[in-house]
Amino acid sequence: MNANKKIIIIALSTLAIGLLLGWLIFGGSSETKMDDEHQYTTEMAGETVWTCSMHPQIRQGEPGDCPICGMDLIPLDNDDGEELDPMAVSMSPTAMQLADIRTATVGTMDPVKTVRLNGKVQEDERLVSSQSSHIPGRIERLNVNFTGEYVRRGQVIAYIYSPELVTAQEELFEAQKIKETQPQLFKSARAKLKNWKLSDSQIDKILESGTPSDEFPITADISGYVLSKNVNVGDYVKRGEPIYEIANLSRVWVLFDVYESDMPWISKGDQVQFTVQSLPGKTFESKISFLDPVIDPKTRVAKARVEVPNKDNQLKPEMFVSGTVEATLPKKSNNVVVPKTAVMWTGKRSVVYVKNTTGSGVSFMMRDVMLGPGLGDSFIVESGLEEGEEIAVNGTFSIDAAAQLAGKPSMMSPEGGPAMTGHNHGGREMPASSGQVKEKETNPVAISQKAKEALQPLYTEYLKFKDALTADEFDQAQNTAFDLKTKLDKVNMSAFTGESHNAWMSYSSDLKNALQHVQHLKTIAELRTTFQQVSEGMIALTKAFNPLDQTLYVQFCPMADDNKGANWLSAEEEIRNPYFGESMLTCGEVENILK
């Protein structure tokens, strides 16, 4: 019995010790395992994720190259905070620093702009006279033989032989003989000579001499400089025919060219300061006395006239001058002014990014604005912003790129949408659209050879623009784009007549709108957006006018313009993509051939 009790006690003790050891071994290791897994999960959650800016579906745990396009991967910021507005794009302080994003508070100011004007000195039209011959006959002598010579009023400038005047003198002598009996006849004969601008003293001298004079002097009616000489010795002139053009240059006009874009800033009475290159160190100042009410249809400028005293004859006609006007628009209650770098312009819309700071961090919201006149490096904002709001003034394209990747509203996608996924590489799904760009409908229009020659420089500069973007050369691309804008302004519109004139006005207007801010663009991405708009216009223009003898290729990239696709013109069939440059140089295909 005692032995059984001992066995039972030993068994129970062994069981208790086993349970205790099992709990210590397996329970403790399970807790340790859970702690290890939690630590591993935490480390993975805190690990930096790397993605591709062109293919955001790529996610890797370490830096490297994109397996699709080969671009360098970039770190993907984790947004743990909540956004108050689902349409805003959040950016961490690190991302803002890397993208060089700077902000400023919107303020108001008086809309003052320094308008630069170029012009030329011209003679005052009111002080220009034609010196005519009062006597018909043949020019015997010219005392003023070249233009630019100064003449004084009453100076003898030419001698003329007039058979009619000789006859009139003989009639005067005959009338003098019967003066006592027929005085009225004598007065009529004398008056006939006075009608030819002979003075009483000249007529008295003729009567004293008793013989008719063969040559009669022509005297200057005004003082001034001879602008043109219209006759030579031996020429026959009629009564009233001009023989000289004489200008009094004691007061001159300066005619400045005012472009359409500057018309809101220039008005009659504005003070103008100007300099002349041939008179260094000297500044002239006067007011605008007249502004043309009509714009010249060829040059697209209006003339602003400034009247300037010229006693020392320093200002000579046809001198070039450069002037400035401190122009001020009528002050409104809220003249909001923002830097040009803050505005992104698509041709139809102008947008800015407004900064919002909350407990969750910093976010930016895109907002459409209506722009007023430009003030050099800034714009007046007519509507869309209020004083005191904070906006991005640098790095706006980086914010817009982040918005596109996040599917938020952006410059090219105002309604937002899914992030772009790129080409169909390795079985990945391509965009739903076929990739074809909807082009403007064009109707062929016949133009003259003169018009075709006028368009040649546009294609030369456009192809240079395309090549510079292909090589990722920002400065060269901007310069060639500006040259294209200059060549566009110089196209002679008179070469386009009839139906082609209306077509040219439409195409040139689209191109000018696309290029008007090209000199102010700061990044190559902005230039590529401009290039897309220019390409659409050039393709439509080519299809309408067919101005070239060479073959052009319409090429297409399905990834450009946020996967909507974009076309461009090339003189070579080989694909060299201007929208992505070296990063995706051969992306694209030939869509059409224009012969």
Image (cartoon, grey):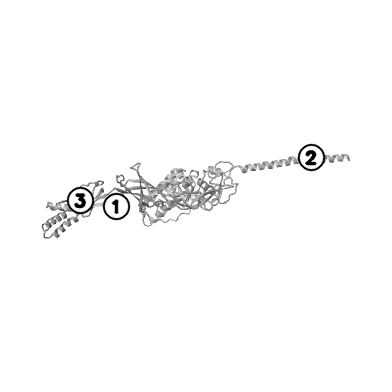
What's under tag 2, amino acid-wise? Ile
The alpha-carbon separation of the residues under discs 2 and 1 comes to 127 Å
The alpha-carbon separation of the residues under discs 2 and 3 comes to 147 Å
Packing grade of label 3 (10 A; few <14, some 14-19, many >=20) is: many
* Residue placed under numbered mark 3 in the picture: 218
Element type at mark 2? helix
N-terminal of the pair, mark 3 or mark 1, is 1
Element type at mark 3? strand
- Residue 74 at least partly seen: no
Residue 519, given in percent of the width and then of the height, sits at 43, 46
- Residue 88 at least partly seen: yes
N-terminal of the pair, mark 2 or mark 1, is 2
Q: How many marks?
A: 3
Q: Quadrant of residue 188?
A: bottom left
* Residue placed under numbered mark 1 in the picture: 126
* Residue placed under numbered mark 2 in the picture: 17
